Image: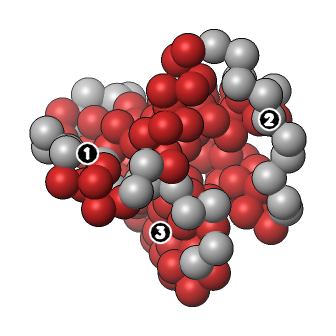
Amino acid sequence: MTTSGSNKYANASRRFMAQAKVELEIGDFVQASEKAWGAAACALKAVAEQREWNHQRHSLLYDVSDQIADELARPELIDWFGLANALHQNYYEQWMPEEVVENSIPRIELLIAELETVRQSPAPPFTLETRAQRRRLERLTARRETAVAESPE
């Protein structure tokens, strides 16, 4: 377990969420979107780091989100991370209405709070039931050097 790395990402998540709220307050919905995305991504990285999972690529954050959702039987966590990713896209495309950004931030806060609880708790027992779950766990737990070297990104 890499506690210092996990704490680094958790602290960054809190900092980004605080900044997202400031940006929202001043009406910069584009920056609020990106900071909320950063907060969600760092919260996932904090859990991944704590569990010694790979998280160096954007696609691996989906694996982390999916794995945690499966472990907890909480599919809404996947939806909340999908919303965070939409906020990330909004930073570049600026297509999201302001009220959608405003309504999304509280759900990202719920995701972050749930991930912090996960980070502070031992990993629950998990039984692999599908080939997709096995492949996902292999991507998350493969030696980091190999996972990064094989990355097409």
C-alpha separation, residue under disc 2 versus residue under disc 3: 31 Å
Dot 1: what SS?
A: helix
Residue 106 place in picture, x, y as percent? 66, 46
Which residue in the protein does label 1 denote? 91
Compare marks 2 and 1 and give the one earlier in the sequence: 1
Q: Is residue 35 left or right of residue 12?
A: left
Which residue is pictured at 68% across the width and 40% down the height? 68
Q: How is the image coloured?
A: secondary structure
C-alpha separation, residue under disc 2 versus residue under disc 1: 36 Å
The amino acid on which the numbered mark 3 sits, given as a three-letter code, is: Phe
Tag nearer the camera, 2 or 3:
2
The amino acid on which the numbered mark 2 sits, given as a three-letter code, is: Phe
Which residue in the protein does label 3 denote? 16
Residue 28 visible in the current orientation: no
Say above or below: 145 vs 79: below
Q: Is residue 151 left or right of residue 125?
A: left
Return the mark for residue 126.
2
Compare marks 2 and 3 and give the one earlier in the sequence: 3
In which quadrant of the rendered image does the N terminus lie?
A: bottom right
In which quadrant of the rendered image does the C terminus lie?
A: top left
Which residue is pictured at 19% across the width and 45% down the height? 150
C-alpha separation, residue under disc 3 versus residue under disc 1: 14 Å
Which residue is pictured at 29% across the width and 62% down the height? 145
Residue 74 place in picture, x, y as percent? 78, 29
The amino acid on which the numbered mark 1 sits, given as a three-letter code, is: Tyr
Tag nearer the camera, 2 or 1:
2
Would you call the spot at circle 2 few (<14 residues within 10 Å), some (14-19), or many (20 or more)? few
Dot 2: what SS?
A: loop
